[in-house]
Amino acid sequence: MSESGFGFDTLKVRGGYDPREHNFAVSVPIYQTASFELGDTDRVERLLRFNEDGYLYSRMGNPTVTVLEKRVAALDGGTAAIAVASGMAAITYTLFSVAERGGRILTTPHLYGGTVDSFKRIYPQFGVGIDQVTDPNDPEAFRRGITPETRAIFIESISNPNATLLDIQQIAAVAHENGIPLIVDNTFATPYLLNPLKHGADIVVYSATKALGGHGNVIGGVIVEGGTFDWANGKFPQFTEPHFLLRDDAGVERSFLELAPQSPFTLRVRLTYLIYFGAVLSPFDAYLLLQGIETLSERVQKQVATAEKIVRYLESQQGVAWVSHPAAQGSPYRSLAEKYFPKGAGSTFTFGFNGSGAQLETFINSVRLFSYQANVGDSRSLIINPPKTTHGELTPEELLFAAIPPETIRLSLGLEEPNDLIADLEQAFATALKRGGITHGNQKEQ
Ligand SMILES: *Cc1c(COP(=O)(O)O)cnc(C)c1O
């Protein structure tokens, strides 16, 4: 099926898949196989020299996983994508790919907790340095943060957990002036709400575990490349040097850029990180993600609408000190939301619980419909206290720097009736605040 010209909702159910190539199966088949018949010795030569497309072993590629990769690439307008076993693998493989030879990554304090922990404790052990801008709202801060070793800027398009936004186009301009790519974790936004590549980003990463899959039943990650970044600008020899796996018929080694000028980045992730470090997505998990993506627009539309209702409800509550969502009154991100998120700025966000630490715990223990768990983007609504869980490894100073004070509660809205969700919050506020009455102001001690 030719992909050109189709709209998002067509691509999300059909992109990357031609039933005629799969025995006319309507639903994408699960190729539950570790390995593939090589045919004959001539064919294996052609496969290994990249003269024929085909599969050898499922750690290098699998037809079910390929459909997922092509579909997500189509939804984001990328030239290629690679699926991996988790969002963390997508981030690590991507950032190591650009910074692996002693490079540095410039980022913000507004990141997923696992990303923060790995940046602080794991990356330095591999010789990859991390720099954080102190004011991500100021694009000039990114310009000032770049060093000769910086190999990429990494941001979250809608940040975890506070749903803060950034001026992606301006940050992309700073990256490109310095010959480095902008890499965007677009997990909270999904390709339905935002296509970062269209705003100048060069690589997009996803925790597909979240809203892409959307049903809380699979861990996965995806990396998408835009195909326009100049990897030959001298800062990234790993893309222009001859590589031992890329020998041609005469045995001469080629570079990733020579072999795949439109998709050198994802090919290199596949032939270095995926096949040797091995965080491979299983065909069954790829199938579950494809199934989830079929209803991405419908789910996200409803979740965004519900989020806006819940924001309004929370703003009217005495038990709420603040609400951090771009649709909240007085949010500093309203104009960025208008520019980048006309369809809504996501359905995962935070609010400040206006009460004691004990009352906050009673509140969380009192919800009946919201599930208390460390996930987002599920079809069910979820609640969590990030300072003690998802961001529990941050020091008190880091929590303050990341704007996650002790009273922070994160909600991820699902597909239930909004009124049932509001009734659930209502009864939990009543239970939590009846003991000791309502305290006014942000009571921060736990
Ligand atoms: C969950 C999450 C990740 C990590 O993804 P996993 O699939 O859990 O490995 C990365 N980034 C963001 C923004 C996330 O929410």
Image (cartoon, helix red, strand yellow):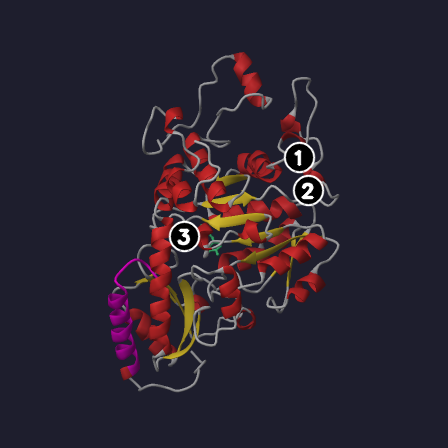
| Label pair 3/1, CB-CB below 8 angstroms | no
Amino acid type of the residue tagged 2 in the rendering: Trp
| Label pair 1/2, CB-CB below 8 angstroms | yes
On the image, the x and y values in percent for residue 362 come to 31, 74
Amino acid type of the residue tagged 3 in the rendering: Lys
Label at residue 257: 1
Image quadrant assignment for residue 321: bottom left
Cβ of mark 2 under 8 Å from ligand 1: the answer is no
On the image, the x and y values in percent for residue 109 come to 57, 65
Which residue: 63% across, 43% down? 228
Q: Quadrant of the C terminus?
A: bottom left
Q: Nearer the viewer, mark 3 or mark 1?
A: 1
Q: Earlier in the sequence, mark 3 or mark 1?
A: 3
Residue behind mark 2: 231
Which residue is at the front of the view, 443 or 322? 322
Q: Earlier in the sequence, mark 1 or mark 2?
A: 2
Mark 3 surroundings: few (<14), some (14-19) or many (≥20) residues within 10 A: many
Cβ of mark 3 under 8 Å from ligand 1: the answer is yes
Which residue is at the front of the view, 72 or 32? 72
